[in-house]
Image: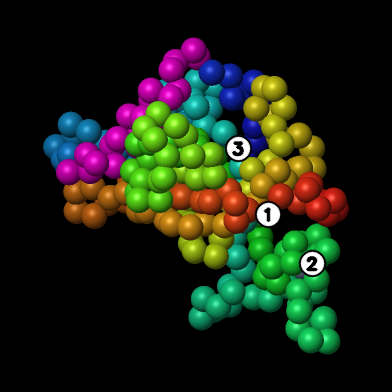
Amino acid sequence: MSFRPNMFATTGRDSSAIADSISGSSASVGYSVSSGEVDLREEYDDFVYGPSRDLSDGHGKICLHRRAVRDASGKVQYCTCKIASPGSHADPDCNHCYGEGFLYEEEYAIGYWQYSGPSGGQSRKLQRLNPGLVRTDLMVFYFRYDQNLKYGDKIVEVELDLEGNVIAGPVRKAIHRIENIAEMRSDHGRLEFYTVYVRESESIRPDEFGVDQ
Ligand SMILES: [Zn+2]
């Protein structure tokens, strides 16, 4: 996938309002897709990639999908630092697994995310704040229906420049553990998009620990 400059330029649309409409659509998955009235995959692509589908007029941002490496039976694989350790402990200074002890493969992904507010849907059960306040340790990510997310994978926020382009490295700002993957499905069970909840307090921030990236 190639990315051109200013690909993330916004059009001045009210992104929070559109985000609300996306999160609100989770309650509207009963809409008929087959009738052609509402196609949530189309709605998702319109919002995240933009009508031209090249991100120039969409609201998507780039991140890394950090996939856990699994064997044929689906078992996650240990990092070489853990295998090499006499006591099979992961190396907390390992610049691959950051002490988690597992192997990952990373690929760039486009998604949309925001901090979870008072209308945070599934995460509402965790809220202890008064209405109007945003709980900053809960984030919700949205991904396309074909992102193939699994528990054990991570979502990595990377440093972006002022135009939304990835700063060389990439520099990993936060490695988020997935707390909940909600498959947003509509008629006939068709997967329309993913809603993924992460908890900031359980995320790894490599720069805080001076780990080489
Ligand atoms: Zn390791």
Q: Which residue is mark 1?
A: 204
- Ligand 1 positioned in quadrant: bottom right
Secondary structure, mark 1, is loop
Q: Is residue 144 visible?
A: no
Is residue 133 in the magenta section? no
Find the distance from the CA under tag 1 to the CA under tag 3. 18 Å
Image mark for residue 73: none
Closest to the observer: 209 or 154? 209
Q: Which residue is most to the top? A: 12
User: Mark 1 near mark 3, Cβ–Cβ under 8 Å?
Assistant: no
Is residue 21 in the magenta section? yes
Q: Amino acid at mark 2?
A: Pro
Closest to the observer: 203 or 195? 203
> In the rendered image of this protein, does residue 188 appear above or below residue 43?
below
Q: Earlier in the sequence, mark 1 or mark 2?
A: 2
Q: Which residue is mark 3?
A: 62
Where is residue 24? Give x, y as percent: 30, 35
Secondary structure, mark 3, is strand
Image mark for residue 92: 2
Where is residue 206? Give x, y as percent: 76, 51
Which quarter of the image is occupied by the N terminus? top right
Give me the residue at 79% from left, 43% from top. 169
Give me the residue at 40% from left, 46% from top. 127
Q: Earlier in the sequence, mark 2 or mark 3?
A: 3
What residue range appears in magenta?
11-30
In terms of image quadrants, where is residue 108? top right
